[in-house]
Amino acid sequence: MARTIAPTPTAAPTELVPRKRRRGIDTRRQTLWIWVFLTPTIVLYGMYTLYPIVASYWYSLVEWNGFSSNQRFVGIQNYQAVLNDPAFWSSVKITLLFMLLVAPARILLSLLLAMVLNSDKLPLRNLFRTVYFLPVVTTTAIVGVVMQFVFDPASGPFTAFLRALGADVGIDFLGDSGTALVTAAAVYVWKFFGITMVYWLAALQTIPTELYEAARIDGAGSFGIFRYITLPLLMPFLLIITVLTVEDTFHAFDLMQTMTGGGPFFSTEIIEIYIYRWAFSASIPQLGFASAAAVLFGLFVMVVGALQAWALVVARRSRKDLS
Amino acid sequence: MSAITPVSRGRRIASKAPWWGVVVLLAVLAVIWVYPFVWMVSASLKSSLEVFTAGLQIWPEDFAWENYSRAWTDANFGRYMINTVILTVSTVVIVVVRCALAGYVLGRFRFRGQKVIVGILVATLFVPTGYTIIPIVKLSMELNLLNSLTGMILALSGAANVSAILIYAGYFRQLPKELEEAATVDGAGFLRVFFQIMLPLSMPVTATVALLTFLATWNAFFLPLVFSFSDPDLRTLSVGMQAFVGENATDWSGMAAAGVISIVPIVALFLFLQRYFVEGIAGAVKS
């Protein structure tokens, strides 16, 4: 840190230089304050985000059966074990399948709804916006537990509803390995739909209303307006919203853990639950093994994150071209 | 627009007509949307027997308020509520302070190492909890913070929140330079410029960051779960709910009452400050 504080004539890290004469002292003091201001973030972020990222790599190379037991270096054995574990690949598959189930639903359905809710002719639109957004703010872990009861095959309200419609009863939506993932996906869409809807509403608000008016005067129909005005102007947002939503679907631990716990028969075991199972709920915790899985998961999310950064750049550029 | 002739009013109603069809559709969807919450509130007021037999009946026969006292006292949700409030308020304060400080210097000044810091922050924007949880537990254990609220608070304040820093940085960057030039001429130092001019100006951002952090912390599950394994008294509402169902699988009305207790504060906050919530979330695409 001492090195950064030292005033080097080339550094001149300031935009606000009141008097040339005092520049050296001012700069030095300012640099000092800058680093003081950064300290809480450096300490906390360093301890609880950066250090864990780095430490995971080390932990993934050791055999380590419990937080208070010793670590023994085993090289890449954990990675070999993880990659040879069919359950790991199953959880990767389920994570991706889950993403493919929920992301399109969240993105496209919420666009449809946002376009309707964006119209100022619609009565009660603020009420509808509030209602559709409501599940987003509720505690995911609580919703997950409540959903276990809602979908209870004997006395749950969903079963009662199907019974009232005259349907054959007794489907255990969350307890059957054939339906559990789809049901979980539906609940997830319901729960987080509002976020994507708000993204779209923000995107729609960037389109000036004069454009619509001009198009209408020129005789364009609703479909023409959508096809030639709304859609092209929304394209850059589609990229951003897609990556934000996809990234979001990898964080479904709270809902899955409380709703299905990864079951039945591991049919809803996403990667985060797989890691959790080996690290925290196994009778003999396999922390090295779980760390290796975590590192692989982190790399996986990072690849998607890199894709995100790239998409943002592309989106910015095309937005600039338009304006 | 101001002079409404009968003709234009008639046309207005006609032009609104198709919307009512849409409204009906949206209303049906809205009922489905809130139904799980309505069911939860209704179940929390029914007797343990009625919950199982009521079917679609929403209105309880007798209001069984004792479900709430059972959840609050016997199931320890009073304790969990206190824990959650302490955890959330402390985390919000720490996050707001540290993000405002960091965002201010990152957005307003140029200094050595700045690009490195911003680069690291952006690169770790989406680090999942599942990835960092094992080292966090190990570190907290060594610092003797594992079974304590303090440990939870620090871990939650240190994780993520990159977007909060970026929001602050973006806001401070676009403020006019004359602001602090005038103050500096008057002899104000670095600290006074920040606390007396910049921080008060950033109130809208602070409101957004505080609300989103509040939401994330109140609803946090993974970290509090792992931090309270060996001490049930440290559970938050979200963790307590799962434990409650694990121990009393048949007490549906108690479960529902506990759920209502846990969700009402955050829903109330949302209804009062809806605009800020929505703006905060929309900020992700606007920037």
Image (cartoon, helix red, strand yellow):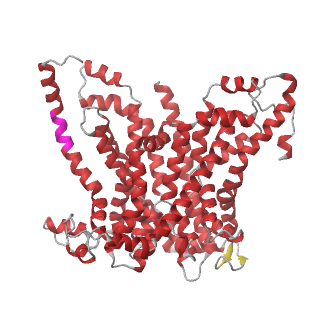
Q: Position of residue B194 (x, y in %)?
A: 68, 36
Q: Which residues are magenta?
A: B17-23
Q: Is residue B84 above or below residue B120?
A: below
Q: Position of residue B134 (x, y in %)?
A: 62, 68
Report the predominant secondary structure element of the magenta stretch. helix
Q: How many marks?
A: 0
Please check the rendered image and state whether residue B62 is part of the magenta-colored stretch, yes or no.
no
Residue B93 appears in the figure? yes
Q: Is residue B23 above or below residue A290?
A: above
Q: Nearer the viewer, residue A147 or A217?
A: A147
Q: Residue at x 33, y 49 (%)?
A: A132
Q: Nearer the viewer, residue B131 or B176?
A: B176
Q: Nearer the viewer, residue A295 or B186?
A: B186
Location of residue A292 (image quadrant): bottom right
Q: Residue at x 71, y 35 (%)?
A: B192
Q: Position of residue B132 (x, y in %)?
A: 61, 62
Location of residue A54 (image quadrant): bottom right
Residue A268 appears in the figure? no
Location of residue A11 (image quadrant): top right
Q: Residue at x 51, y 27 (%)?
A: A320
Q: Residue at x 47, y 66 (%)?
A: B237
Q: Is residue A9 left or right of residue B157?
A: right
Q: Is residue B104 left or right of residue B11?
A: right
Looking at the figure, which quarter contains the N terminus of chain B? top left
Question: Which residue is outermost to the bottom?
Answer: A283
